[in-house]
Amino acid sequence: MKINFLFLLTVVCVSMLFSCHHDPDPVLLAQDTVCFKTDILPIIQNNCGKSGCHNGYSRDENYNSVADILKDVKKNDPYGSKLYQNITNEFAIMPPSPNAPLTKDQRTKIFVWIQKGADTSSTCK
């Protein structure tokens, strides 16, 4: 009986671990474009590029410029992009408390922006 309980407990714990993920919002995925200047940059500036975070003083990633941000982006591949991996990592949620985590809407916008080529032009299509 004790072995069955431990087995069941293990199965439940493992399934919970792998069932928690950050799927992008399907409604936002249908968007044609996400504008870097008005949609993405404010998210990064307000949550990542501020003092004590990814501003070049205390972390490996530096998000002081567009070029710095793009170093962590693999265009057309959100899952392969360090930026997206970091904001969806379940063991180190970004940003850390008290602002954690980014909303599903914010994560989805970043996902769509990367998936659509991570365009940083000042004009959105």
Image: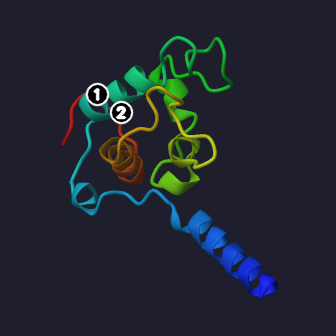
Image coordinates of residue 23 in percent, x first then y, are 41, 60
- Which residue is the extreme one toward the right? 3
Residue 48 x, y percent position in the rendering: 48, 25
Residue pictured at 55% horizontal, 15% vertical: 55
Residue carrying label 2 = 120
Mark 1 and mark 2 lie on one chain; the one further toward the N terminus is 1
Front residue of 123/111: it is 111
- Circle number at residue 113: none
The quadrant of the image that shows the C terminus is: top left
Label 1 – label 2 distance at C-alpha: 7 Å
Q: Is 23 positioned to the left or the right of 27 in the image?
A: right
Indicate whether 18 appears above or below 65: below
- Check contact, mark 1 vs mark 2: CB within 8 A: yes
Please provide percent x and percent y for residue 108: 35, 49
Query: Is 93 above or below relative to 123?
Result: below
Q: Determine which quarter of the picture holds residue 12.
A: bottom right
Q: What amino acid does circle 2 point to?
A: Thr
Question: Which residue carries the number 1 mark?
Answer: 37
